[in-house]
Amino acid sequence: MTSFAGVLDRAARHHGGAEALEARLAATPWTARTPDELRAVPDDRFLAEATRVIFQAGFDWAAIDRRWPDFEAAFEGFDPGR
């Protein structure tokens, strides 16, 4: 199994260096929010975004974005009550 340091190093190389990677991570919608802002996100949107991030971790982000409406439909709008 690859160590976290190895994964981080590979990501930094892929995204233009450690500083560029840090800037990209800091610009994500979830890391830029305060705890109160996160609590205000409806459960279905929180679940949808968590799912999107998980899928993007293993696949091409653009491919996930193109197919996102299909994910919304397949997961019934990410409604936790369903």
Image (cartoon, rainbow, N blue to C red):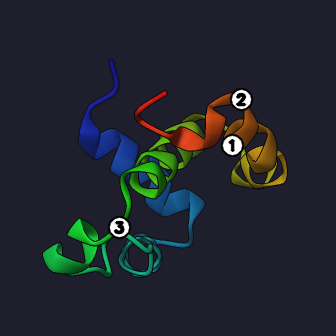
Q: Nearer the viewer, residue 53 or 41?
A: 41
- Residue at point 43%, 74% (across, down): 29
User: Which label belongs to residue 74?
Assistant: 2
Q: Residue furthest front?
A: 81
Tag count: 3
**Amino acid bearing label 1:** Glu
Q: Residue furthest right?
A: 66
Residue 40 position, x and y percent, is 28, 72
Q: CA distance from mark 3 to mark 1?
A: 17 Å
Q: Quadrant of residue 59?
A: top right
Residue that badge 1 annotates: 72
Q: Residue furthest top?
A: 1
Sequence-wise, the earlier of marks 3 and 1 is 3
The answer to whether residue 10 is above or below residue 40 is: above
- Residue at point 80%, 39% (across, down): 70
Within 10 angstroms of label 2, few (less than 14), some, or many (20 or more) residues?
A: few
Q: CA distance from mark 2 to mark 3?
A: 21 Å
The answer to whether residue 66 is above or below residue 78 is: below
User: Which label belongs to residue 60?
Assistant: none
Residue that badge 3 annotates: 41
Q: Are marks 2 and 1 in contact (CB under 8 Å)?
A: yes
The N terminus appears in which quarter of the rendering? top left
- Residue at point 47%, 49% (across, down): 10
- Residue at point 71%, 29% (across, down): 74
